[in-house]
Structures are given as C-alpha cells and as structure tokens.
Amino acid sequence: MRRLALLLTAALTAAACSSGASTPSTSTPHVPATAAPQAESAVYAYSYAPGDSYRYDLSLEQHVTMHTETSGDPTFLGTDEGPKDVDVTTTVAGTIDYLVADGPEPGTVQLNISGVFDELSVEGTIDGEPATDAAVEDGTVPDLVEVPDVTVVVDETGRIVSVNGEAAPDDATFLGDPFAGVAGITSGGIDKPFGPQFPDRPLAVGDTWTEEVTEPIPDLDQEVSSTVTYTVTGMDTIDGHDVAVIEFTAGNSGIEIDLGEVFQAMFEGFAAMGGDEADTADIPTIEFVIGVDDSEGSGTYWFDQEAGIVRQVDQTYTVPMTMRMAVTSTDGDGAVDVTMSIASHVQASLAESGGVSG
C-alpha cells in the first residue's frame, strides 16, 4: 500500500498548492493632498498602442489560514507529518510588465503580461510555531501566488477577446476550466489586465455598471457565475495626472469537483495490469472532493482618461476552499479534511511606460 500512500500524498499536495513563485511590495497607494478635479460625462476607453510598454510596481500580500483534521490511521494517507493549523501571511514584491502588440482584429491589441517577483517575506505561525521563508520554499505553506506569463487580446473597452490564443466566449467566466480562474483570484487578479471592462456609454461621477456572466460545466452538471459591479466614485490627481476613481465589488459562485472516481479508476487499472485477482479484490474505496466556495473581491482603480491607462490599483480577493480525502480498504481506513482561506491584497502603481509619461 506504499504506492497508495504516495499517490494520495501527491494528490493532496496538488490540490492544496497551485504552482508559482512568490513575492509583495513597497509601493503605497496615492493619497490626494489637494481637492479632486471635477469631470463631465465621458466615454471611457483604453489607449494601448502597439510598441508601447508599461511597468507596474507591485506589492502582493497573501494571508493563508488552513486547518487539517484526520481520522483513522493518518499514516495510511501519508498526511501525519503535515501541519494541522496554519496562519501565515506571505508578502511578495516586484514588477508587472505589459508589452503591447497589434491585435488580430481592428480595434484590438495584444498584451503580453509578465512579472518578476524578487522580494519575499513570511510571518505568522504553523502549529503555534513562528513561520519562516523556508515554510513556503519547502511547501509546508501552500504557495498560491502565480507569477503571470500570459498573452491577452483586448479591445478598447477592456473586453478580453482571447487568452493565450484561446477565444474567450461572452459567457465563459473561466474559459472552460472551472479552476482556471482560481489561481488568478488567489494571486489577486494579476493574471488579467488591470481595470474594468467599460460600457459603451458616457460615464459620470456616481454612475454604476455591472458585468454578469454564467458558464455551465456540463461534465459536472454545475455552473459558475460571476458578478462585478463598478462605480465611478470621484476624481483625483496622481503625479499631476487627472484620474477617475472607480471602485468595484465582485463575487464568484463556488464549485465542487469529485475526483474519487478518477482515483478509483486509476487503482482499478493498476490491478488489471497486474492480472492478480487478489489485487483486484483489494481495490480501495476512495473519496476525494475539492471545493472552491463562493469567493469575493473589492478594490479601486485610478483611471487616466486622457492617457487611457490605469495608473494605480488596490484590490483584494478572498477565496475559501475545502478538501476531503478518505480511503477504505482491507489494509486500513483513513480520512483527512482540510479547510482553507486565501485572502490576496494587491497594490500596484504605474512606474514606467513607452506610451505615457509615468
């Protein structure tokens, strides 16, 4: 049964940790020192131009809490050495670069979004003991920060047309993969261009608009929905540039994935290859369910209408997750239940650009 323990341990690790490098920042959101300018109603649009480049100084703070409970024989599941209680904040800092190229259709541009995270700090506790940077490096604390490396095609309103060459249907919140958006959300949304999708009508201070999309997941007989509400709350000035202040709230519905049948079939395949009737009779019963519960977000964009670019970002996303893994077999029984919450806070400020003066 050693193979069983190894496979289940690998599954637990894969479920709890998305891959990614880590790092938060030293930049601080602008606080206006003078009276904010006033603005009349106007149509908002992005002005990315092929050949331009933009750099944002980034700070990302991720707070992870995780509680694990085991029953039966924990060594049977290979989880006896893992932490039971984690309350850790990881802070990373670095830069996000946008390189602008021609889009495939008129009115679109291609953004190559990449990041460099070069600072890391960890504080908090693991089973009551102080956490260290090594806890992230060795996987004791799940590293859920994805360094972006993505190509996105957008139009002038900020609507995403495609991601890495794959078309983005109007009703596809997660581009066909119910977990594709999770890594982006736990990383604070830095895998997509900063800023909202604007409506095709003039906006004035006090105006609100909402984006609502729903994607069915036929294989799971479930659907995922997302709602984001934006409000132009005022005007401000950043480094001499007039900007509109746009606040948002967001919510994503949860989804549950049952992987028990997948692992059951895996062991049945191993047994069939062995050709031993005794091995076939010893196939364990496996329960393996991963849940991403309803998540929420909020934040503020400072949008430069004249330059057509977001100059500053402050946004937070919170994602609760659960996992249950249980095995019943002739060799023993065991179960592990994990509850986790990931809160990611991003602050970013435009530092350099080839299209506007920063």
Image (cartoon, rainbow, N blue to C red):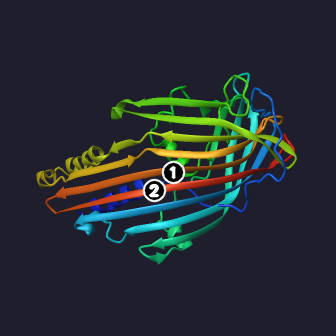
Q: Is residue 140 among what the camera can see?
A: no
Residue at far bottom of view: 129
Provide residue 187's location: percent of width, then percent of height.
57, 51
| Circle 1 SS class | strand
Position of 318 compared to 247: left or right?
A: left
Identify the residue at horizontal 64%, vertical 31% (top origin).
208
Identify the residue at horizontal 77%, vertical 54% (top origin).
31
Identify the residue at horizontal 69%, vertical 43% (top origin).
301
Mark 2 residue type: Ser
Provide residue 63's location: percent of width, then percent of height.
53, 61
Q: Is residue 348 among what the camera can see?
A: yes
| Circle 2 SS class | strand
Q: Quarter of the image holding residue 279?
A: bottom left
Q: Are marks 1 and 2 in contact (CB under 8 Å)?
A: yes
Q: Residues within 10 Å of mark 1 (few under 14, many from 20)?
A: many
Checking the image for residue 286, the label placed there is none
Provide residue 35's location: percent of width, then percent of height.
83, 47
Identify the residue at horizontal 33%, vertical 66% (top origin).
79
Q: Which residue is mark 2?
A: 341
Q: Nearer the viewer, residue 250 or 147?
A: 250
Provide residue 73's location: percent of width, then percent of height.
22, 67
State the separation of the CA atoms marked 1 and 2. Answer: 7 Å
Q: Which residue is mark 1?
A: 318
Of the numbered discs 1 and 2, the one sitting upstream in the chain is: 1
Q: Nearer the viewer, residue 63 or 133?
A: 63
Q: Quarter of the image holding residue 254?
A: top left
